[in-house]
Image: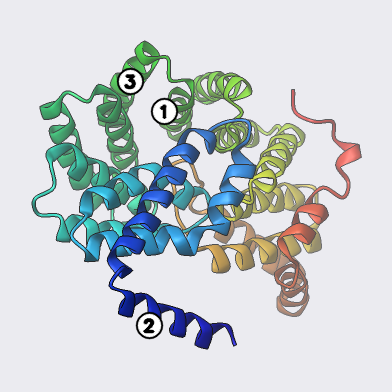
Amino acid sequence: MLEPVRQYALERLRESGEADEARWRHARYYLALAEEAEPKIKGHDQGEWLDRLEAENDNLRAAIGWSVEAGGPRTAARLGWALGMYWVMRARHSEGRLLMEQTVARGTDLPAEMRARALWALSACVYGSGENERLMALCEEGVTLFRKVGDTRAEAYTLGMMGFAALQLGELDRATRILEEALEMFREQGDDWASAQVLTHLAVVPLRRGDYPRAATYAEEALELTRRTGDRLAANIALYLLAQAASALGEDEQATRYFRDALALTFEVADKTNAAYCLQGLAAAAGARDEPRRAARLLGAAEALLEAAGTHLYAQMDYELYQRVADAIREQLGEGAWTAARDEGRAMSFEEAVSYAHEDEEAIPPAP
């Protein structure tokens, strides 16, 4: 019954001649909500505000779509700037990307700053998709525009994303230079949230080069900042990086503690993509402890989460981890037992997978 009622109400609204004004009031209301939420989704109340945006997602999407359609791309660009990290943390990359591509395409007369803000939101959604050359091009244009208008805070955000793009392209020296420049700007601005994001990605360079103590230093500094800001995203990434470093040094129990702590943070904010990568790490740890069925179940749970949320390969991820562990476990168990255990993991809900990953937590103290 709801759809006929909705259609009837829309028809009466059109007949009243007030449809456009109602839509603009709607867009302005949700722009205000998004801009109120933007700092909150980076702090201690992150989960609550992400849930609030999730509950209003249809309205937020409609507000952007109407703004673009009605020739109000400035409103759409402002919405994208405010919602970029929400789209990332709630695996709505494809949706955000489509909306911002429409905003950029239709907004040919956008002021430089508004265009750059839409480009940043678009780049946040493109990051991890594998389109790394395009990501770099979006960031380069955005940095140029922000420098032109003198918006140093937004310039630093876009520089940070450019550093992520350089990492994805394997340009490690360039990534370091860009990220260090962004970090200096964020420190001058007192932006601990953004500083932590950059520090986690600076850690990727020494991690890839085998300098695990230096990678851990960056990650630990980022983790300390997140204790002040309350941001679970950078905290999760920092712990994931510390787990990789510990694993590479043969410190399997320490790696397990870090992966579990990271997984707990992803659960707090329903970040299913990063949760899946933590489950893969725990599968590797289970395999190292000669628990092949447990490893297979964890890999199956991770598979299902990524299929639902979308697979985004970020710079800090061990791209080959899944296949490396899966091949070893399949060989150890045999095809039938591997398939049965993996399917058991795939059948788990998000809550069940996280609970299963922590089942023997008491045997391993939490990471310091």
Q: Is residue 237 visible?
A: yes
The CA distance from mark 1 to mark 3 is 8 Å
Disc 3 target residue: 180
The N terminus lies in quadrant: bottom right
Q: Residues at badges 2 and 1 in contact (C-beta under 8 Å)?
A: no
Q: Nearer the viewer, residue 19 or 134?
A: 19
Disc 1 target residue: 198
Disc 2 target residue: 11
Instruction: Give the structural element (helix, strand or loop) at label 2.
Output: helix
Instruction: Give the structural element (helix, strand or loop) at label 3.
Output: helix
Q: Is residue 46 left or right of residue 356?
A: left
> Which one is earlier in the sequence, the residue at label 1 or at label 3?
3
Above or below for 102 versus 159: below
Estimate the x, y position of residue 220 in percent, counting from the top left.
58, 21
The C terminus lies in quadrant: top right
Q: Image quadrant of residue 159?
A: top left
Within 10 Å of the Cα at label 2, are there few (<14), some (14-19), or many (20+) other Cα atoms? few
Q: Nearer the viewer, residue 18 or 250?
A: 18
